[in-house]
Image: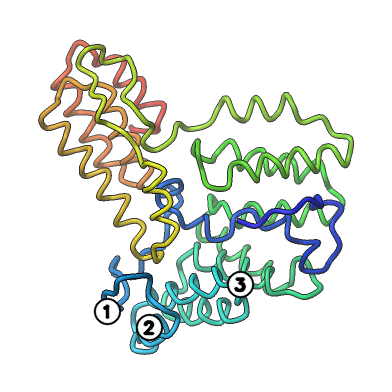
Amino acid sequence: METAEQTPAGGSQNGSGRAGWFLLGGALLLAAGSIGYNVYEGSGGGSSDVAATDGPATIEQLRAAAEASSDDAGPWSDLAFAYFQQGEFGEAAAAYRRALAITPDEAVLWSALGESLVMGSARDPLPPEALQAFEKALALDPTDPRSRYFMAVKLDLAKDHEGAIAAWLDLLGDSPQGAPWEADLVRTIEQVGKINSIDVTARLAKAQSARTPALLAPGSGSVAGAAASPDVRGPSAADVAAARTMKPSEQRTMAEGMVAQLEARLVNEPKNVDGWVMLIRSRMTLGEPAKAKAALDAAVKANPGAAADLRTQAEALGVQ
């Protein structure tokens, strides 16, 4: 993730001065922290046809896989992501355009294109084509966090600092705890507030207090008492580090595997109420409300004495 000592509001319009804007970057694609934001997984949900190697695929391998793909945007997305990570933003934008030519209705591809264009711009901090890409992403998915972030940047550039801060606070409130962009987003809000004499302390605290719990928080809490399993944990630091090296098409698979492991564990630990709540939350974060409802029903059946608490927590997570 890119950060800068110079604040966004005070930055110049060259590449180094604009660095403070780019807090999302490739981190948006980390499944461990952001799978609720519909990480792109290719039209068929599979990964690129890149031969297995002892290390990450090379640009040459990713390009060969992309060129061989005429009906799957995944390989082009993988290639674009690799270019972005290497700072080759023009090449990244070109690859995202190829992905969008195949799958034009993926919001995350449009927002990734927009950020690549912003990063590759020598002078304009928010080029027209980038703005159009963010607007397209939001038309497809109003929750897309990267596009929401940069539309707030647009407000700040237009001197509507209060409006920008309000939009960033809304984004923070909607971000899962531990989201990869969390620290930089908070810092941006604090910096823009300080530069423009806007007190954000109380508003930050309010936004933080209303946030969704992390997808798979470590431990299983106290609700289940002695039945709680110490083995129900979320991604470790190693898991998150590993996710940073994955191709975008592999990341949701990783997240789904973690959730499947939790679900399998609950078959043997049906009295683990916190584990059930964690599974319900995870299913909602993955965009699977029917599976979340099924998990709630199974949890209530296994723990009738905790039915009211389970239903309350599920309702707070949006389970109908």
Disc marking residue 61: 2
Residue 136 locus on image (x, y percent): 58, 66
Q: Amino acid at mark 1?
A: Ala
Q: Which residue is mark 3?
A: 87
Residue 104 locus on image (x, y percent): 47, 73
**From mark 2 to mark 1, how far is it between C-alphas?**
8 Å
Q: Nearer the viewer, residue 132 or 91?
A: 91
Q: In the picture provided, is 262 more to the left or to the right than 165?
A: left
The residue positioned 80% from the left and 43% from the top of the image is 192
Q: Earlier in the sequence, mark 2 or mark 1?
A: 1
Q: Quadrant of residue 137?
A: bottom right
SS under mark 2: helix
Above-or-below relation of 297 to 184: above
**From mark 2 to mark 3, how far is it between C-alphas?**
18 Å
Quarter in which the C terminus is drawn: top left
Q: Earlier in the sequence, mark 2 or mark 3?
A: 2
Disc marking residue 94: none
Above-or-below relation of 106 to 229: below
Residue 182 locus on image (x, y percent): 58, 42
The residue positioned 30% from the left and 65% from the top of the image is 45
Q: Amino acid at mark 3?
A: Gly
Q: Quadrant of residue 310?
A: top left
**From mark 3 to mark 1, how far is it between C-alphas?**
24 Å
In this picture the colour scheme is rainbow
Q: Nearer the viewer, residue 67 or 2?
A: 2
- Asked if the residue under mark 1 is in contact with the one under mark 2, i.e. CB atoms within 8 Å, the reply is yes
Disc marking residue 51: 1
